[in-house]
Amino acid sequence: QSSCCCMSWRNDDRVGRAVNDYIVVKWLHILSSTLLFGTGIGTAFYMFFASLTRDSAIVAAVTRNVVTADWIFTATTIVIQPLTGFYLVYLAEIPVTSRWVMWSTALYLIAGACWLPVVWLQIRMHRLAADASSRKDELPPLYWQYFRFWIGLGIPAFVALVAVFYLMVAKPV
């Protein structure tokens, strides 16, 4: 029996396929995690600082793009991540009950649980900003209430994903 990438296989053809599958899936996993984290931190940065301008026209434009980016990038990668992650665990013959896998999964679910209301808040914040902009008015108090909740949910999601990145790299037992 030969082993490759923490995987045991009985014949060389399977080893070649397994290595190729593992590399492709790992690449997809890393790429999608980059898109997930990058989109999250990038859109949060722009939405935060656009909001601080207090200019309803700027906030309306930025929040519209943030909502669009969330649906295009975050929604797709939030699905791809667990699919590729658990497939990598399977290919590498790592027990799903490994502590780092279980912690990664729990933290990922926490980040996802924060993201769902964040999307709802971003849609509402965009509508409030667009309405204020069309009236050439300032952002309403409800926008700022949503803004505080948005920040409050974004911080634990960010911390959870940073911890997941650590666990993916270090794989502590």
Image (cartoon, helix red, strand yellow):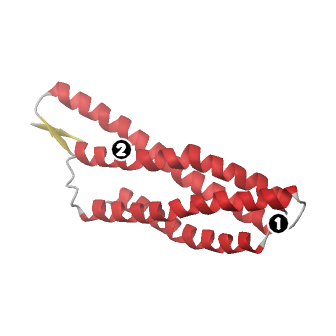
Q: Residues within 10 Å of mark 1 (few under 14, many from 20)?
A: few
Say if 19 sits above or below 145 in the image: above
Answer left or right for 151 relative to 13: right
Is 159 in front, or is 172?
A: 159
Q: Earlier in the sequence, mark 1 or mark 2?
A: 1
Residue 84, numbered circle:
2
User: Measured from the top left, where is residue 102 in percent x and y?
Assistant: 28, 63
What residue type is disc 1 on?
Thr
Is 83 in front, or is 15?
A: 83
Is 3 in front, or is 132?
A: 132
Is 115 in front, or is 91?
A: 115
Residue drawn at the location 16% of the way across and 27% of the way down = 12
User: Measured from the top left, where is residue 118 in percent x and y?
Assistant: 57, 62
Residue 172 falls in which quadrant of the image?
Answer: bottom left
User: Measured from the top left, where is residue 68 in percent x and y?
Assistant: 64, 47
The residue to which callout 1 is attached is 53
User: Measured from the top left, where is residue 138 in percent x and y?
Assistant: 85, 67
